């Protein structure tokens, strides 16, 4: 199999057909989007009675999964002919902020709003 033609740009090789650096990671990996992690978090949040749980999954508070779920719900509404994106995001923001305030009033240490939003978003 012939290798793809490349040209050098400084110290790095650039593929002339795609314009990408050969040692460059994929875009989703560079942005930190990990679909395996998203599916594990979703299953963990939806089934809290699992016997073997890796709690290191919940340490990081990412918002990639909740945003993907909100966009999917918006697309489903759009396919039914209803354009209610404002209702989805507005209700979600009000619910997350309200629950964050309630949890901070009840807890002596408090909780981060990003972690609250991440857990609630995975519960969608």
Image: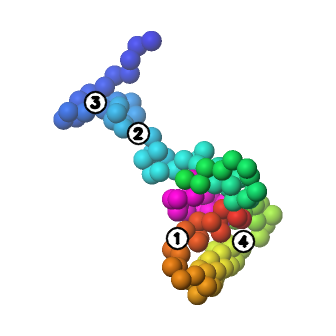
Q: Nearer the viewer, residue 106 or 69?
A: 106
Residue 110 position in % (x across, y down): 52, 79
Q: Alpha-carbon neighbours of circle 4 within 10 Å: few (<14), some, or many (≥20)?
A: few
Q: Main secondary structure of the magenta part?
A: helix
Q: Quadrant of the C terminus?
A: bottom right
Q: Nearer the viewer, residue 45 or 66?
A: 45
Q: Earlier in the sequence, mark 2 or mark 4?
A: 2
**Real-space Cα separation, disc 3 to disc 1, in angstroms:** 39 Å
Mark 2 highlights which residue? 25
Label 4 or label 3, whichever lies nearer to me, is 3
65 in magenta: yes
Label 1 or label 2, whichever lies nearer to me, is 1
**Real-space Cα separation, disc 1 to disc 2, in angstroms:** 27 Å
Q: Is residue 80 left or right of residue 100?
A: right
Q: Nearer the viewer, residue 52 or 97?
A: 52
Mark 4 highlights which residue? 83
Q: Is residue 19 left or right of residue 118?
A: left
Mark 1 highlights which residue? 114
Kindly identify the residue that appears in the image at 45 percent across and 51 percent down.
31
Label 4 or label 1, whichever lies nearer to me, is 1
**Real-space Cα separation, disc 2 to disc 4, in angstroms:** 36 Å
Residue 79 position in % (x across, y down): 77, 60
Label 3 or label 1, whichever lies nearer to me, is 1
Q: Which residues are magenta?
A: 57-70
Mark 3 highlights which residue? 13
Q: Earlier in the sequence, mark 2 or mark 3?
A: 3
Q: What is the quadrant of residue 77 in the picture?
A: bottom right
């Amino acid at each position: 199999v012939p290798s793809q033609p490349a040209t050098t740009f400084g110290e790095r090789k650039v593929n002339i057909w795609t314009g990408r650096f050969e040692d460059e990671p994929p875009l989703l990996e560079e942005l930190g989007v990990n679909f395996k992690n998203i599916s594990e978090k979703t299953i963990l949040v939806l089934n809290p009675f699992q016997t073997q749980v890796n709690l290191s999954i919940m340490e990081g508070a990412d918002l990639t999964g909740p945003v993907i779920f909100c966009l999917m719900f918006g697309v489903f509404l759009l396919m039914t002919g209803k354009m209610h994106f404002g209702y989805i995001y507005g209700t979600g923001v009000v619910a997350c902020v309200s629950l964050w305030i309630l949890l901070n009033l009840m807890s002596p240490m408090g909780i981060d709003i990003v972690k609250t939003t991440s857990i609630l978003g995975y519960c969608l």
